[in-house]
Image (tube, rainbow, N blue to C red):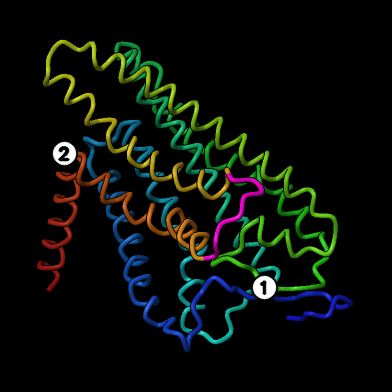
Amino acid sequence: MRSNRTTSVTKFLFSGFPKFEDGGVLFFIPLFFIYIFIVTGNLIVFFAVRMDARLHNPMYNFISIFSFLEIWYTTATIPKMLSNLISKQRTISMIGCLLQMYFFHSLGNSEGILLTTMAIDRYVAICNPLRYPTIMTPRLCAQLSAGSCIFGFLVLLPEIAWISTLPFCGPNQIHQIFCDFEPVLRLACTDTSMILVEDVVHAVAIIFSVLVIAISYIRIITVILRIPSGEGRRKAFSTCAAHLGVFLMFYGSVSLMYLRFSATFPPILDTAIALMFAVLAPFFNPIIYSLRNKDMKIAIKKLLCSQRMLSTSTS
């Protein structure tokens, strides 16, 4: 960790956290319980889908994969946040920073692609129900799930490889609560005009995904409103409400973070936006999926009851 421009920076210092002396431990406790809830809640959703034969269909398969990704998405950043809150040395190594950026954004990309796939799945199910079983086959469902994850991880490799070649020889303070592209690139001791290119690439990817999902749901809502029975409309809306809620939270917070280009926010607002999409959105996702879906609630109850019975019999 050096500030001399003739030497190479080997560590970065996070400045988005309150210092230990300023009550960092007070933020540690709620963040710790939020992280435990995220991991536990998403594990419950994942296993509830996997262990209930009634939920073995494309929609719930995508939900279970999304929940699995959420666990690792938050694990890429929150444990390091927790350690920084109770440590006087709020640092991360160069390699650790690159790995955090890679896994956090690769998992985020995979989730974004999966949300787009889920929107298309709902579009086919509601707008073309008779052909849905022949279109969304188990094989295609598995290919889409695997493809979302593989593409999400491969697409970031060139970007991370390029950042790893940049010289860092000056200030080492990252004005954020985790390693992110823009704050890290601003510390490079070279021409950082590529930051604008990075912003444009990220913006195009985000806007494209949002447009695909928005068009899908505009079409879905149009079809639902034509359903003659109120019960039919209610059931159709209920199957989409959870996904639409997760989509709005995920892309709403991501857009605030990455669709601002050269605009700068106060540090406290920057930190709040980062917490929104890195912590709060994953916190609410298992709640949305479990409370807004009757079949999911039944599956979760069955899972918890079976575990309780198993623990009682073993004791």
Q: As displayed, is residue 300 above or below residue 134?
A: below
Quarter in which the C terminus is drawn: bottom left
Circle 1 SS class: strand
The amino acid marked with disc number 1 is: Gln
Between marks 2 and 1 in the image, the one whose residue lies nearer the viewer = 1
Circle 2 SS class: helix
Q: As displayed, is residue 184 above or below residue 214?
A: below
Does the magenta segment cover residue 122? no
Residue 173's tag is 1
Q: Where in the figure is residue 115, as x and y percent of width and height?
A: 43, 36
Q: CA distance from mark 2 to mark 1?
A: 48 Å
Question: The magenta stretch spans which residues?
Answer: 260-267
Say which of 299 and 274 sits in front.
Answer: 274
Q: Main secondary structure of the magenta part?
A: loop
Q: Dot 2 surroundings within 10 Å: few (below 14), some, or many (20 or more)?
A: few
Could you say which quadrant of the image residue 99 lies in? bottom right
Q: Where in the figure is residue 288, as x and y percent of width and height?
A: 27, 46
Q: As displayed, is residue 145 above or below residue 77?
A: above
Residue at the image position 47 percent from the left and 71 percent from the top: 79
Residue at the image position 45 percent from the left and 75 percent from the top: 82
Whether residue 98 sits left or right of residue 306 in the image: it is right
Q: Which residue is under mark 2?
A: 294
